[in-house]
């Protein structure tokens, strides 16, 4: 090989190395910018609503000690970084559905979970709420409606706890069949099944029949996530329609109180 050929070969190698370095730098800068963008969205959520978003903490950092032990055996698990942009979009949409002050007074954190579970029932729970901490735990789902539904479902428990004195519970019970009050560990079958028999009793789904809080949770989430579908259902069943009016009036009252 001639000296000129060696020089040209070295130059080609150098150009290849430089191209690799440039590409690597671009990737690193893009990754850093992507990460910074996510941090800014999380910071903005906290600044606007006083709500922290936990996505990469251990179960011990999120859950109170008593929930990590028997009989609860709680677990959450961190979600993957690639899932965070979508999850933040769902959280932002959920927060925008309420007056800002209502969120500030009743929610302090949302914890995104990889595999949420209690009582060793990892397939049963998609969300939970820690009422004392005013924290929602929500399992990540790729379908936005699943997460959105869970967030509204769990937040309604916090609102019910704080504003029960404004809720016409006796009127609600007049439009409900008998609750089973079944412990979650004893629940079997499809809890989300729905049929005319349940609706005539005033229940949207089988899980609604479990207890008053579950009943309200299911109605509240449907009211925010699928309002048109909910209306098509309730207008055919007198008990459901009365419950719909109660939910609508309750949230309007909360909105007026927190303006």
Image (cartoon, rainbow, N blue to C red):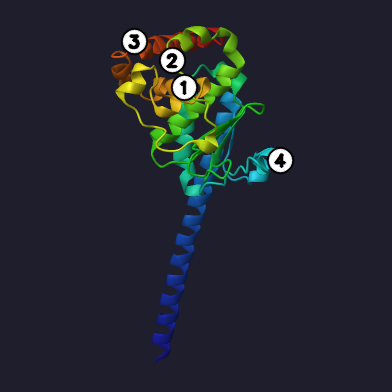
- Whole-percent x, y for residue 176 in the image: 43, 15
Q: CB under 8 Å between callouts 3 and 4?
A: no
Give me the residue at 47% from left, 70% from top.
17
Q: In which quarter of the image is residue 70?
A: top right
Depth order, front residue of 28/91: 91
- N-terminal label among 2 and 4: 4
Q: Is residue 203 above or below residue 145?
A: above
Q: Please name the residue that numbered disc 2 is placed on.
A: 176
- Residue occupied by mark 3: 238
User: Which residue lies at the image location 49% right of the left edge and 10% below the top edge?
Assistant: 250
* Residue situated in front as seen by the camera: 163 or 215: 215
Question: Of the residues under marks 2 and 3, which one precedes in the sequence?
Answer: 2
Residue nearer the viewer, 117 or 103: 117
Please report whichever mark, 4 or 1, sits nearer to the chain's N-terminal start: 4
Q: Do the residues labelled 2 and 3 touch (CB within 8 Å)?
A: no
Instruction: Check whether the beta carbons of the residues at disc 1 and disc 2 lie within 8 A of each other.
Output: yes
Q: What element carries label 4?
A: helix
Residue under the image location 45 percent in, 66 percent down: 20
Packing grade of label 2 (10 A; few <14, some 14-19, many >=20) is many
């Amino acid at each position: 090989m001639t000296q000129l050929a060696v020089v040209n070969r070295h130059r080609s190698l150098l150009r290849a190395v430089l191209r690799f370095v440039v590409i690597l730098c671009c990737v690193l800068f893009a990754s850093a910018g992507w990460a910074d963008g996510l941090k800014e969205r999380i910071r903005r959520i906290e600044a606007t609503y006083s709500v922290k978003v936990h996505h990469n903490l251990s179960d011990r950092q999120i859950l109170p000690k008593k929930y990590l032990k028997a009989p609860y055996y709680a677990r959450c698990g961190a979600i993957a970084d690639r899932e965070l942009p979508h999850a933040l979009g769902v959280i932002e949409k959920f927060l925008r559905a309420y007056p800002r002050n209502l969120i500030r007074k009743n929610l302090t954190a949302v914890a995104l979970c990889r595999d949420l579970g209690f009582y060793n029932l990892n397939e049963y729970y998609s969300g939970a709420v820690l009422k004392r901490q005013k924290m929602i735990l929500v399992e990540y789902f790729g379908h936005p409606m699943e997460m959105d539904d869970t967030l509204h479902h769990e937040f309604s428990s916090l609102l019910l706890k704080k504003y029960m004195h404004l809720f016409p519970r006796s009127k609600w019970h007049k439009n409900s069949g008998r609750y089973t009050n079944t412990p979650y560990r004893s629940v079997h079958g499809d809890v989300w099944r729905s049929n005319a028999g349940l609706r005539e009793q005033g229940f949207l789904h089988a899980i609604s029949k479990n207890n008053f809080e579950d009943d309200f949770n299911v109605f509240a989430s449907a009211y925010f996530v699928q309002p048109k579908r909910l209306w098509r259902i309730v207008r055919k069943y007198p008990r459901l329609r009365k419950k719909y009016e109660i939910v609508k009036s309750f949230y309007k009252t909360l909105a007026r109180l927190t303006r």
